[in-house]
Structure formats: structure tokens, C-alpha cells
Image: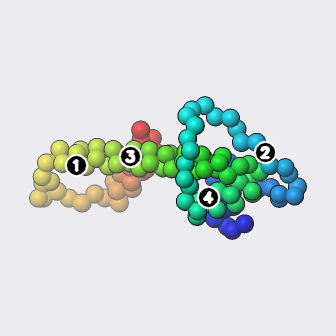
Amino acid sequence: MSAPQEEFSTLLGFGTHAVSDHARERAPRRRGRRAQLTVPDDLWEAAREVAEAGGTTPNDVVVRFAEAGKELLERRAQTARLADRRWRAYLAQGEPAVDAALPTAEEAAAAARAFRQDLAGSD
């Protein structure tokens, strides 16, 4: 198995198993709608390799890929909302004073810390 498939297996919450050491586990039962999909060949091959390493089914891996993609899109939307709020707050300040002094190193460091804390605690 390639390094990317091992990474996927770890990120998706699978352990890595040698196929000969462990029988494939049954994929967990999920609630929701059943669907028939045509999965692109390269995605199916990746899902098959990750499933083999993780001791589960390719279908289970495809669902986990979709869940991971959903989480990524939600995070991107959250980041976009935060950026929009910050941009609007910046615009609301109006024009900066021409004679405004640059912040000191301590003020800049404090602002950077506040920014990181805000980012870590953003909705």
C-alpha cells in the first residue's frame, strides 16, 4: 500500500492490518438513505487499498471519504464567514488616521496572539 493510502487509513480512523492476519471486519451499520453510485475508478482503487489496510470494506471507506469531504467544506465555509466578519469589521473602522503610528513590537505580538486565539475559538 502506498503512503497516501496509509495516511488516509489513519485519518479516517482505521488501524492498519495485514490482510493475512485479520479477517475483514463488517462495515458499521449506518442510518440514512441507501444510494447506488458510480464511483470513479481511481477513487474506488484508493478506497479498496485503504479498506484492505483498515480491515473494512471499500463502501465503508467511500462513505468516510464523503464524511471527511463534508467536514472540509464545512471548515472552509466557517473560515469564509470569519474572513467576511473580519473584513466588515476592518471596513467599519473607516479611514485610518494619516498620522497614526505603527504598533510597537509588543503591540504587534499581542495582536498576533489575539488573532490566533480568535481563530482557535471561532465558530
Which residue sits furthest top?
A: 31
Identity, as a three-letter code, of the amino acid under mark 2: Glu
N-terminal of the pair, mark 2 or mark 4, is: 2
Figure quadrant of the C terminus: top left
Q: Residues within 10 Å of mark 2 (few under 14, many from 20)?
A: few
**Residue that label 4 marks:** 44
Going by the image, does 88 lie left or right of 107? left
Q: Secondary structure at mark 3?
A: helix
N-terminal of the pair, mark 1 or mark 3, is: 3
Give the residue at x 88% y 55%. Answer: 21
Q: Secondary structure at mark 4?
A: helix
N-terminal of the pair, mark 4 or mark 3, is: 4
**Residue that label 3 marks:** 77
Position of residue 121 relative to residue 19, above or below, is above
N-terminal of the pair, mark 3 or mark 2, is: 2
Give the residue at x 49% y 45%. Answer: 70
The percent position of residue 43, horizontal first and vertical second, equals 58, 60
Q: Between marks 1 and 3, how big is the CA–CA gap?
A: 20 Å
Q: Secondary structure at mark 1?
A: helix
Q: Between marks 1 and 2, how big is the CA–CA gap?
A: 53 Å
Which residue sits furthest bottom?
A: 2
Give the residue at x 15% y 54%. Answer: 96
Image quarter of residue 97: bottom left
